[in-house]
Image (spheres, grey):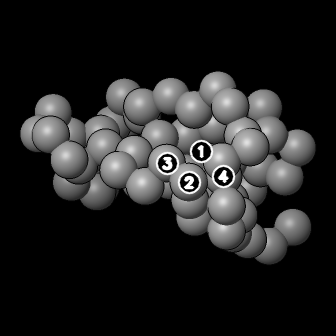
Amino acid sequence: MTEQAIPDTTSLSGWRKSTYSGSESGSCVEVLDNHPSGVPVRDSKVTHGPALVFTADRWASFIGALKDGVLPR
């Protein structure tokens, strides 16, 4: 599966703020668990979308890089 985008996320519910979002207001990333196409990710300030959809493997690699300090938080 290749990454894709969801142009309008209005109909999707269950978004949660990523634990890796900054504590500063306005820099929040939301993710949606258990979506059939992968892991949708969107800017919390734009709740209608768009969202990028990552494969579970690529999302896990990204989170792993954050945890390992390879990428700055």
Q: Report which residue position mark 2 lands on.
A: 48
The reply to whether the C-beta atoms of the residues labelled 4 and 3 are less than 8 Å apart is: yes
Q: In 3D space, how far apart are the residues under numbered discs 2 and 4 (Cα atoms)?
A: 5 Å
Marked residue nearer the N-terminal end (1 or 2): 2
Judging from the image, what secondary structure is the residue with disc 3 in? loop
Type of the residue with mark 4: Thr
From the image, state whether disc 1 or disc 2 is nearer to you: 2
The reply to whether the C-beta atoms of the residues labelled 2 and 4 are less than 8 Å apart is: yes
Which of the 4 quarters of the picture holds residue 17? top left
Judging from the image, what secondary structure is the residue with disc 4 in? loop
Q: In 3D space, how far apart are the residues under numbered discs 3 and 2 (Cα atoms)?
A: 4 Å
The reply to whether the C-beta atoms of the residues labelled 1 and 2 are less than 8 Å apart is: no
Q: Which residue is drawn at 78% across and 32% down?
A: 34
Q: Report which residue position mark 3 lands on.
A: 47
Q: Which residue is drawn at 33% across and 37% down?
A: 20
Task: Judge the density around disc 1: few (<14), some (14-19), many (≥20) Cα neighbours within 10 Å.
Answer: few
Type of the residue with mark 1: Ala
